[in-house]
Image (spheres, rainbow, N blue to C red):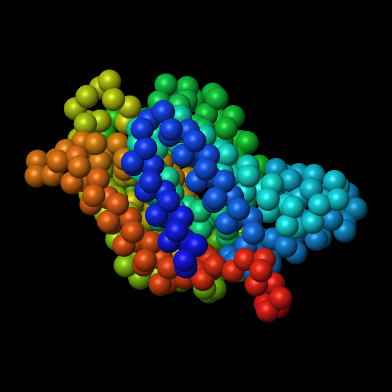
Amino acid sequence: MLLYFLLILASLSGGLLPSKNQKTYLWTIGAFCWLLASLRYVTGFDYRMYETIFQTVAEAGLSGLPQIEPGYLLLNLLVSRLGGDYRVFLFLFHLLFLVLVFAWIGRYSSTPWISVYLFLVLQYLALSMNFLRQALAAAVLLWIYPFLKQRRFLPSCGIILLASCFHWSALIMAPLSFLLCLRPSKRHYGLAGAAAGMAYLLDPLLCAVIARIPKYQHYLGGIYWQGNSVLYLFLPVGCFLFALPLIKQAMEEPAVSPVLANSVFYSLLIQLFITRHFILERLSIYIAFFSLLALPEAALLPGRRLTAKRRTILLLAGGFAYFLFAASQGFHGVYPYRGIWDQVILP
């Protein structure tokens, strides 16, 4: 846990630096994140699974490759054909992931150091150490943001297709892209909430559909198909309440892009389904990632009772409380952290 605490503390140092040093700050923290993620050993629930995939790709001929998304398969092939092992693959993977995320933060965040802090405490670094394919797909999808702001759907579709080469579920952003560009309103959110409520109530129908799809039948009755505690709703509900000034601004000012405000709302709707089936919450990752921009933006907008400074303090405190909760629950299997120096004592 000490390494995580030190990294979180280091991320806060950005708030003390002048703006001209922000780029150096970003890449320094990014480098520490890269080393932490790349030097792990059996850290992350899927560590062994992805190690097995890499070894299978390295040993297989072109006709014996595993059936996984082509972009992720290509990364494995590239490293293995150049003589690298799984450790080299992790270094390359996390380099790509963190460059995509930190370059995006540096370009579009109003307060980069808060975005970096949230990246750590809201478990996005932890995500990248477990759901490798989905994490890289999410990092690619971050770059849809400038095109959505301009309502340019053709290049947005190109980015969605590229992201789906790393995880097919990225295709959910195709319909969500249109919804994110709609102006927030009581009617908009009311209809969306009603549709989500209907889907929640029609869960038996969803189960019947899944039962007829051979590829996903194994989820039924498994641990990932079970519902989780309502405790897991505290984060999306808290983010939504914190972002209310941002949503109000998007409602009242046509010149303000609605993308960030809507991302918080639709992330909440999707994450509600974690109380039905744990695995459905994973579909929210792509738009939840936009909270790295949305929450710092909301912090700059004072509400009726709180100044921007107090809202920032509240955001930092809430984020750290969530980190402690995630660590206590063992999110993504990354707590406690184990590095390659533990290899001699771990199987």
Q: Quadrant of the C terminus?
A: bottom right
Question: 315 or 76: which is nearer to us?
Answer: 315
Q: Is residue 249 left or right of residue 20?
A: left
Q: How far across and how far down the image is residue 156, in percent?
A: 52, 29
Q: Is residue 346 left or right of residue 104?
A: right
What residue sits 86% from the left and 47% below the top? 81
Q: How far across and how far down the image is residue 244, in percent?
A: 21, 42
What residue sits 38% from the left and 42% below the top? 14
Q: Is residue 185 left or right of residue 280?
A: left
- Quarter of the view holding residue 163: top right
Up/down of 128 relative to 15, above or below: below
Up/down of 189 relative to 228, above or below: above
- Quarter of the view holding residue 190: top left
Question: 276 or 239: which is nearer to us?
Answer: 239
- Quarter of the view holding residue 318: bottom left
Q: Is residue 270 visible?
A: yes
Outermost residue, left side: 305
What residue sits 43% from the left and 33% below the top? 21
Up/down of 306 relative to 103, above or below: below
Question: 333 or 147: which is nearer to us?
Answer: 333
Q: Is residue 168 visible?
A: no
Question: 283 or 220: which is nearer to us?
Answer: 283
Q: How far across and how far down the image is residue 343, in percent?
A: 69, 72
Q: How far across and how far down the image is residue 109, in percent?
A: 39, 34
Q: What is the count of numbered marks?
A: 0
Up/down of 243 relative to 110, above or below: below
What residue sits 59% from the left and 50% below the top? 34
